[in-house]
Image: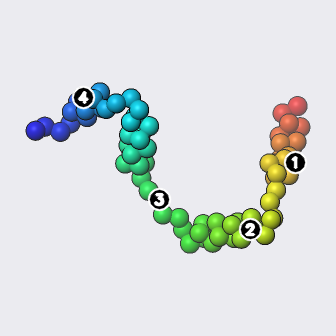
C-alpha cells in the first residue's frame, strides 16, 4: 500500500464531521514541533505561578496601558 498525501486526503474524507476537531488537534501536534522550555523559561513560569498564587495579578491596562499610550503619542 502506497502511503502518500493522496492516501490521507481520501482517508480524511471518510472521517465523520463530528470527529474533525479531534483530527485537527492530532494533526497540529504532529505538524508543530515540540520545543522544550529553557531552564530560564521554566524558572520564569514558576515565578509567575507563585505570584499568581499570592494574588499578585495585573490587568491588561496596568501592564500595557502606558505602552499603548506612548504608541499612540508616537503615531500622532
The residue wearing badge 1 is 66
Residue 44 appears in view: no
Question: In this view, which residue lies farthest toward the left?
Answer: 1
Quick check: marks 2 and 4 in contact, CB under 8 Å? Answer: no
| Secondary element at image label 3 | loop
For disc 2, the marked residue is: 53
- Look at 42% across and 52% down and name the residue there: 33
Q: Position of residue 58 (x, y in %)?
A: 82, 56
x, y percent for residue 52: 74, 64
The residue pinned by badge 4 equals 10
Q: Residue at x 41, y 49 (%)?
A: 29
Instruction: Kindly tell me whether residue 60 is visible in this rendering.
Output: yes
| Quadrant assignment, res 48 | bottom right
Residue 11 position (above or below residue 63): above
Q: Quadrant of the C terminus?
A: top right
**59 lies left or right of 21:** right
Question: Tag 4 or tag 2, which sits nearer the N-term?
Answer: 4
Q: Which residue is mark 3?
A: 35
Amino acid at each position: 500500500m502506497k502511503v502518500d498525501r493522496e492516501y490521507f486526503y481520501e482517508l480524511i474524507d471518510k472521517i465523520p464531521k463530528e470527529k474533525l476537531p479531534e483530527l485537527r488537534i492530532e494533526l497540529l501536534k504532529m505538524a508543530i514541533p515540540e520545543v522544550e522550555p529553557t531552564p530560564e523559561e521554566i524558572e520564569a513560569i514558576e515565578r509567575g505561578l507563585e505570584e499568581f498564587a499570592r494574588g499578585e495579578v495585573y490587568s491588561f491596562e496596568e501592564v500595557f496601558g502606558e505602552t499603548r499610550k506612548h504608541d499612540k503619542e508616537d503615531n500622532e
